Image (spheres, rainbow, N blue to C red):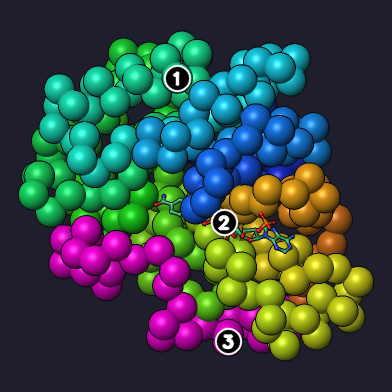
Amino acid sequence: MTARASLSFSKEKGAIPAIGFGTGAMTGGMSVEAVAAALKAGYRHIDTARKYGSEPAVGEAMRASGLKREDIFLTTKVSHESLRPADFARSVDESLAALKVDYVDLLLVHWPNPQIDVAEYMLALAKAKREGLARHIGVANFNIALLEQAIARCPEPLVVLQAEYHPYLDQSKLLAAACRHGLVFVAYCPLGRGRLFGDPVLAGIAQARGRSIAQIALRWLLQQNVAAIPFSSKPERIAENFNVFDFTLSEAEMSRISALKRADGRVANPAGRVPGGWD
Ligand SMILES: NC(=O)c1ccc[n+]([C@@H]2O[C@H](COP(=O)([O-])OP(=O)(O)OC[C@H]3O[C@@H](n4cnc5c(N)ncnc54)[C@H](OP(=O)(O)O)[C@@H]3O)[C@@H](O)[C@H]2O)c1
């Protein structure tokens, strides 16, 4: 296993598919049908977490799909409440049992916990990898300082940083830090949880190109070498969000979209969970 994970825009074996299906729905739980629709539409990267309660549905849809286990890049996460070593190992075991799989492709720390030293849970994360329970490991919702501490303290290479990213949130510094350390950046809430859909600039670019706003926002991420994990409950939108590999935004369009960043653009922001704040 190399220290670096690569991002795949085609069907390269073992790499991280650039579009994944998010299963952390805010309301209504996650249906087996939605995950099945994603696999049918061509998604081969599924994002779940112990906290979402979606692991059983994800596992069931994977088994029903008839796809081979190794054809799906599966991510799960350990919650900030389970970062002490014994809790951590139990959480990973529970995830694998709920998914009914022997390993995940990517295991992430879901959020940091200001009450626990990062070195402590980096050992637990590395242990899960060494035991073969995760092919790759990484972190989510870490700021730059914490990311650098985690990299320094983890005995195994971290390969992914997952964080909120969409046109309303400037993540240029965090993205540069992830690139500097050879990590793949995975954007969550890539559609700003629906906030982007009334945007006139995105609507104008979408109309000019005969695409949807969701497709424009996702393509903007992909062209920065960022993976995205959009969620939708609707099969037609699930398919639409995957259909972003056959067009290219111009430099001018990329710049116009980047200029949409706002000071209040963040949508996932649990108070006080990131030691030192976001920046
Ligand atoms: N690591 C973390 O801490 C963290 C935090 C948050 C999220 N995540 C991950 O990121 C995933 C995605 O984030 P998210 O679900 O919060 O937000 P999102 O993907 O940015 O937006 C989802 C919303 O957009 C709507 N939508 C999706 N596609 C659409 C389309 N083509 N046209 C119009 N509306 C569309 C969906 O509604 P409909 O269902 O009605 O289509 C849903 O309300 C989560 O599921 C989870 O896996 C991770």
| Residue 266 percent location from the top left of the image | 42, 72
Q: In the image, 221: left or right of 234? A: left
Q: Residue at x 62, y 43 (%)?
A: 21
Q: Amino acid at mark 1?
A: Ala
Q: Amino acid at mark 2?
A: Val
The label on residue 226 is 2
Residue at (61% x, 20% y) in the render: 60
Mark closest to the chain's N terminus, 3 or 2: 2
Q: Position of residue 119 (x, y in %)?
A: 13, 40
Q: Main secondary structure of the magenta part?
A: loop
The residue that label 1 is drawn on is 98
Look at the image and say whether residue 275 sits in the magenta stretch.
yes
Characterize the local packing of mark 2: few (<14), some (14-19) or many (20 or more) Cα atoms within 10 angstroms: many
Region of the chain picked out in magenta, as a range: 251-279
- Gap between marks 1 and 2 measured at Cα: 29 Å
| Secondary structure found at label 2 | loop
